[in-house]
Each structure stands twice: as structure tokens, then as C-alpha cells.
Amino acid sequence: MVHVSATPVLALRGVSKRFGAVQALTDVDLEVHAGEVVALVGDNGAGKSTLVKTIAGVHPIDDGVIEWEGKPVTITKPHDAQGLGVATVYQDLALCNNLDVVGNLYLGRELLHRGVIDEVTMEKKARELLSTLSIRIPSVRIPIASLSGGQRQVVAIARALIGEPKLVILDEPTAALGVEQTAQVLDLVERLRERGLAVILISHNMADVKAVADTVAVLRLGKNNGSFPVKDTTHEEIIAAITGATDNAVTRRAGRRSAEAAK
Amino acid sequence: MSDTSKTVKSDSGPEKAAGTTTTPAEDPTAAGVLVTDPRLLVREEGLKGYVTEFKRKVKGGELGSLPVVVGLIIIWAIFQFKNDRFLSADNLSDITFFMSATGMLAIGLVFVLLLGEIDLSVGSVSGLSSTLFAVWVVEHGLNPWLALVLAVISGVLVGALHGWFFAKIGVPAFVVTLAGFLGWNGLMLWLLGSSGTINIPSDEGPVKLLGQSSFFMDQAIIGAYLLAGLGVLLSLIGNFGEQRRRKAAGVPYRPTGEILVRVGLLALAAFVAAAVLNNAQGVSNALVIFLAALVITDFVLRRTTYGRKVFAVGGGIEAARRAGISVPFVRISVFAISGGFAAIGGMFFAGQTASATLSAGGGNTLMLAIAAAVIGGTSLFGGRGSVWSALLGMLVIQSITTGLNLLNMNTSIQYMITGGVLLGAVVIDSVSRRSQKAAGRA
Ligand SMILES: Nc1ncnc2c1ncn2[C@@H]1O[C@H](COP(=O)(O)OP(=O)(O)OP(=O)(O)O)[C@@H](O)[C@H]1O
Ligand SMILES: [Mg+2]
């Protein structure tokens, strides 16, 4: 059984964020503990990526409090979040197309050897890391521009694992991946939990969520719409929370199906 | 980055044919072997491999410095055909001396171009710096070396100011530096006042050092060869040092044969150049400083975290920002570097003429500096390039200028030809970017 510590690694209390006329987040609460995988779900535009970006320092929050290991912190730029130990894989991957795989993996925290970038050690570690993920990438020395969408995604994920993060945030990490790579990412999420890291996983795939998450937090129109322990919650309950009604497109469709089957 | 085109080799038997990304077998701590994609095109062993790799690169738009070298040979051949003094030692020596000044401007511009931006003020800033220097030394009797330092600091501050407007206020760099282009030129004209020209004593200080009759080690024959030898030695140590560390770490490395060929070519070029310059009067100190600046800035761009930040911002601003890089800092500092090199270039111009004049840094100085950086292979689109393009590009530009002077062509023709060459370089840059996109490399 997974041990869940008492003080959450990260806690959001009443976080709000607006973009011009769009109130993207309203009074959102969220807690993640060490060794816990929280799945953040919600419809398109629910505000999941925005929430992630506030934690990662890409978009500073307008209102509310972010607590890190019990203490309030201010996160206004990506550097702040990295300093705390937050590693983020963004939905819009954000890699430098002109740098090679090694350069991207270590961007912003290059290893140094006598004050000079240590390409050799970085390359060696990059190869080790990529091979533990058994990822097929033609060469760690080709520019990101030459990689396929899925390969880039894998590089972005590997990037999050360099350094010693305490919280890993994955925004739809499997969206562009094949069957095998998806399974690997899910394995990876489980390994992160076993290592005692906190994980926030965003996914539209309920099967993935049920497979790896401990808790499901639902966002709807930028607000909390329930948080459920995965074990005791059915598929239908989560979907009802996502869509905001028990009578929704998904249940209606399922209903039609069973009615047709009954005929 | 330049490292990506590096060819690699494995020395473990069976994998030899298969290719490049395997690890040397002798190393027990070798990193886990990467799962190599069977579709990956790898270079075959031997000469044929290099030829096919070369063809693939040309098709993929990775022309590197090939067009420049070919262009340079054509240009030299044409001028030599028109006037057989062109390839004389004295003329070649002139080319290397006069290219250093604009070359300094081009080095600063490479930094700016790597961000995908442009600095239109470098010509004016260089003129301003030589004027400041002249005013301080001649009218206020300041120590010339102190005046030099102050002039360069002024250039850095001016550049930082441009960078600040660009990074913090969000004014497009093109417009800020266009304003600088006019404004700083105005300031220079105002400082020179009615006299129009200030003659700087050329018997001491930086103006003497940068003058046309100042040579490395006082024209000692050995001087040129020492420089060439030093360059080759550094390259040998660098290459084999890297090979050793890569072998030890179990990552692909450049085979000894390839290193020897590369260093051999470098040695050939360096010693031929040294012999030619010795046949004239020796290596001008201006050229030595230009080369030293190239080596240092190349090191900064490729080997330091600062350089990596410059490339990152040039390749993806959002990615750089999310990696914790301060984009405003990089932008401001890059414009400051550009301003600093413009000021140094201004001192070189002052050394050439031993004066500060109304026309300093005017005319086509800016155009030539931009043309040099782009012709040399630094992309206008940001994220790709190297300071060595300042050297290659300046060789082309200065050869054209000197050649046309030799043929007594007037300025009108010079401007038209230089404009045409710049356009050609930009077209090559754009086309190669397009084919790189098609080949998935940009
Ligand atoms: N940079 C921005 N500027 C303005 N509005 C934004 C910005 N980013 C997001 N929004 C708005 O905030 C809302 C939430 O967007 P967000 O990207 O967080 O959704 P999401 O839950 O991640 O959706 P998806 O499942 O499609 O990824 C949307 O209405 C979007 O238009
Ligand atoms: Mg999203």
C-alpha cells in the first residue's frame, strides 16, 4: 500500500487566475502528497493546463495561496518552481528546436566541468536515461526539429526526470504516444510514486487515470468539481463530475446503446 | 548546433558496419546502448561514407560554410584574372588588415542574429566610440588606454540601452536600433562640431597598436608561424582531449583519422596564410586581436552556459523561459555585447585612419557587417550560426571591396555589388532554411 504523508507536498488554496476577460480558474483547491498520484481531469478548456502553469510559474496566480510542504510560497517565474523541486511536462512541449536532444534535456541546468559545459557527461547520462525509458531516438545529438511528435514528448518527459524533483506534473503526457510508449509512461508514473514523489497527471483517458491514479480531482469551468479516491469511484461518477450532470452526452449515448442492444 | 553534424564511430567489431551510435565495447561502464532506429541513415565507413553523407547534407540544406568557400574561390579567381596584383602577398595582407575592423562589428552582430534579431546601430556606435576616444584623448588629454576602456564601456552601455528598450519595453529591436543608428550618429556629428575631423596622434596607445604599420612581434618571421602553430596545437589538444574523454565515458567519438584530416586542413590553411603574410610585412596586430576575439567568443557561445542560453532564446523563447532562463537578461546582454564590439570596431577604424571623422561608421559599414555575418553562414532566423562566420564573411566582403578598389571601380558600383552579394547570402539562408524544414532539421 502506498504511504501518504500528512502534510501535502503541494497545496493550492483558493487559487484564481484570469486572462483578460476569461476567468480561467476560480477558487481552486488541490492537494498532492508525497507518494501520491493525483489525476487532474476535466473537459477541454476546464483550466487544467492553466492550473499546471500557475504551479510551474509560467502564469503567476492572481489570488489564493500556494503552500509547499506546509509553508506558503510565491511562485512568479519558472525558476521559483524549479527551485522548489517542481518538474513539469507541458502539454505544448516547449523545447528548443535548434538544440539537440542532450541540449534540451539539460537546458537551464547544464553540467559543468571546470566551468565549461560538460557535453560528454551530459551525453552519457542522457543516453542512460533514455535507455531506461527504452525510447527509440535515432541519436541524442540530432536537433529536436528532426524528431516525431511522440519522440519529442518522450524527450520532454525525460527532461522532467533530470534533477531531483519532488513533484512531477505531466500535462497529457500520453496524448501523442503509441501503445507501447503509453504503457511505459504509465509504468514510469508508478515508479515515480514508488520513489516517493508526488505526481500530478492530466489525462483525458479514463482507463489510464484508473490504472495509475490514487485520487481524481475534477475541474469544471475553472472550478473544483469534486475529488474522489480512485478505488471507490466508478467511471460514471467521474464522468458525471466532469460534465456536471448525471444526464450528459456520455450517459445518454451509453443509454441509447443499451436500449438498441435490448431491441 | 555545430556538434550535430559530427560523425561518430564505434570501434567494436560487429557493430562497425551498422554504424554510429553504439558504445565502444572495451568500456565496462559504458552507458546502456541506445535502441537504434533501423531507419536511421548512418554513414558508411571510409571515403564513400563521407561522400554520401556530404550529398545528403547538401540536399538537406545543411550547407555549412561550403557556399562561402566556393564563393571566395570564385571571387579571388575573377579578381586575379582582372588584375594579377590581387593575389599578391601585399594585397592579401591588406585584406586581412582592413577586414578586422568591420569584422569586430560582425562578431557582435552574430550574437544578435543568433537571437533572431538585428542591430542596425553598430555602424553609428562604432563612429561614436572613435569620436569619444578622440575627444577624450586629444581635447582632454586623457590616457589613451583609459580612453579606450571608457569608449568600449560607452558602447556596452549604449547596446544595453537598446537591449533594455527591446527586452523590457517590448519595442522591436529593429526600430530601437534604427533610432540608435540615427541618434548616435547625430551625437557623433555634434561632438565633432564644426572642425569635422580630429586627428589622433598615432605614435602611442591603441591607435598605434591598431594602425597599419603595427605587426605581431615586430614583424619577426617566426611570429606568424608561432601563431599558426599555436592555433594548430590548440586544435589538436582540444580534439584529442575530447576524444579521450568521450572514449572514457563510452559515448561516440570522432575517429583519429578524421581528427587528423581536420587538423591537417587547418594547419595547411594556417601555415600558408602565415607564409603569405610573412611575404608581405607580417601579421598585423589588428588581425591578431580579431582572431583572438573570434576564439574567445566562439568558446563563450559553444562551451559556456551563457552561450547555451543565447542559442536557447534564439531557438524558442517560451522553452527558454520555462527552463528558467531569464530572457530579458539574455536579450539585454546580447545587445550590450553587440554595442561593445561595435565600439571596439570603432577603435579599429580610428587605428586605420588615425583620426575621428564625420564619415566614421557611416556609409555602408553597417551593411558590410551584416552582410559578413550572414554570408559567413549565421542565419537571420535565429538559433543557428557561429562567430567564425564573421571571419569567412569578412574575407568575402573585404576581398570584393579591395578588389574593386584595385580595379578603380567607383563607389556606386561597389555599393551595387555589395548589395547584390548580401541579397545572395540572404537568399541562400532562406532557401537552406526551407530545405532544412523539409528535411526536418529546422
Ligand atoms: N495564455 C492564455 N491567454 C488567454 N486565455 C487563456 C490562456 N491560456 C488558457 N486560456 C483560457 O483558459 C481556459 C482554460 O484553458 P486550459 O488550457 O487551462 O484548458 P485545459 O483544461 O488544459 O484544456 P485541454 O483539455 O483542451 O488541454 C480556456 O478558456 C482558455 O481559452
Ligand atoms: Mg490542457
Image: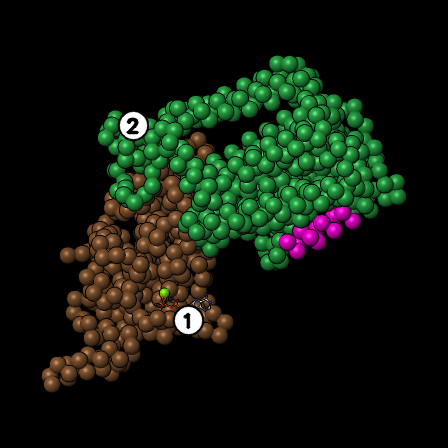
Which residue is drawn at the image coordinates 57% and 37% (left, top)?
A: B68
Give the foreground label among 2 and 1.
2
Residue B103 vertical position relative to residue A136 in the rendered view, above or below: above
* Shown colour of chain A: brown
Is B166 or A2 nearer to us in this picture? Answer: B166
The x, y position of residue A262, in whole percent, is: 11, 83
Whether residue B441 is visible, yes or no, is yes
Please, which chain is the residue tagged with disc 2 on? B
Q: Which mark is residue A24?
A: 1
The x, y position of residue B422, in whole percent, is: 63, 45
Magenta-highlighted stretch: main secondary structure?
A: helix
Q: Which residues are magenta?
A: B174-186
Residue A238 vertical position relative to residue B95 in the rendered view, above or below: below
Q: Amino acid at mark 2?
A: Asp
Q: Secondary structure at mark 2?
A: loop
- The residue at the far bottom in this view is A263
Do marks 2 and 1 share a subunit? no
Q: Secondary structure at mark 1?
A: strand
Separation of residues labelled 2 and 1 (CA atoms): 57 Å
Q: Is mark 1 within 8 Å of ligand 1?
A: yes
The x, y position of residue B425, in whole percent, is: 59, 44
Residue B384 vertical position relative to residue A45 in the rendered view, above or below: above
Q: Quadrant of the C terminus of chain A?
A: bottom left
Please, which chain is the residue tagged with disc 1 on? A
Ligand 1 shows up in the quarter that is bottom left
> According to the colouring, which chain is green?
B
Whether residue B154 is visible, yes or no, is no
